[in-house]
Amino acid sequence: MSALLFPGQGSQVVGMGSEFHSEFESVKKIFKEADERLNYPISKLILEGPENELQMTRNTQPAILTVSYSIFKVLKNEFEFDFSPFKYFAGHSLGEYSALVCSESLKFSDALYLLHERGKAMQEAVPVGRGSMIAVLGVKTEEITNLLQLRKKDTGVCEIANDNAEGQVIVSGSKESVEDFKIILKEKKIKSIPLKVSAPFHCKLMKPAADAMEEKIDNTKFKNPTLKIINNVTAGVETDCVMIKKLLIQQIFSTVKWRESIIKMSETGVKNFIELGPGKVLTGMVKRTVKEANCFSINSIADIKNLINEFKK
């Protein structure tokens, strides 16, 4: 059994998707549609940069969707790859929107708009420099949860933002509170790495962003997906489009339960995990969590041909 995975923020790089864009007219049309829907040349940002503009979350989010969706359509239409036997689709944070588009729950043009607005709302929720995120390495999630109880209670929000993989957890919150938590980690000789982010994503500080997005998501037409989608908030399957909307709103200020999602997929028979989109971030997370998993990252035409050959065996 197989699952299709879609990456989130952090996987972006200038030039992503360029091979597909130059080779396939269908991809040129997708990039053009993105430009027209957003009313600015996001295709130029994706293909040429500048990098600092691409890294702005209001651009990063629709950019990654555009590349992931393009690769999906090339696989499906140009190479006639059959996704119907796949057990699950799943996306990491903004990647959940890619999963919904590729499972025909959400129109690509609507997802572009929502992700652009989501990016703006998340950036505006907390002034630059007021929030912080760190990666905590080599420690189980339960231990981090316990250590968070030790910090000073008056320093503000400090929560698990992403439970990414075994030994890789992201903590997010106010700058002061995260700095306080780093002292606790240092005392326990636990390694942490600061993340270069413009806002503290997936924690309670993002609640204003969720409030800003609620009406926009509610007013967008969703359909029940054609395949099972594992959502980030519960790490469970949700097929009802009304509940999917509610979970997308919650997701903005909730923990991304990615490790739990991978474990659920593995425990229900998934052996092959295929990452569609820029980078190999999710592939690394899967391998850390399920050692015996077969992982494929699809970033090029050669990757597609390799995948097809593997599936023929």
Image (spheres, helix red, strand yellow):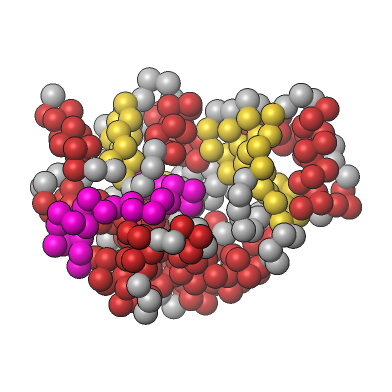
Q: Residue furthest top?
A: 292
Judge by depth and name the residue closer to the eye, 2 or 28.
Answer: 28
In percent of width and height, residue 114 lies at 44, 70
Q: Quadrant of residue 145?
A: top right
In percent of width and height, residue 166 lies at 55, 28
In percent of width and height, residue 64 lies at 39, 56
- Vertical relation: 135 (above or below) 124: above
Residue 237 seen from this side:
no
Q: Quadrant of residue 102?
A: bottom left
The residue positioned 36% from the left and 47% from the top of the image is: 278
In percent of width and height, residue 96 lies at 42, 54
**Is 237 placed left or right of 253 in the picture?**
left
The residue positioned 48% from the left and 26% from the top of the image is: 288
The residue positioned 85% from the left and 52% from the top of the image is: 155
Q: Is residue 26 magenta?
A: yes
**Is 77 placed left or right of 276 in the picture?**
left
Question: How many labels sit on residues?
Answer: 0
Query: Magenta region: which residues?
Result: 4-29
- Vertical relation: 214 (above or below) 299: below
**Is 54 placed left or right of 155 in the picture?**
left
The residue positioned 11% from the left and 51% from the top of the image is: 78
Judge by depth and name the residue closer to the eye, 135 or 118.
Answer: 135
**Is 202 placed left or right of 174 in the picture?**
left
Q: Is residue 118 magenta?
A: no
Residue 19 seen from this side:
yes
Question: Quadrant of the image for the C terminus?
Answer: top left
Question: Quadrant of the image for the N terminus?
Answer: top left
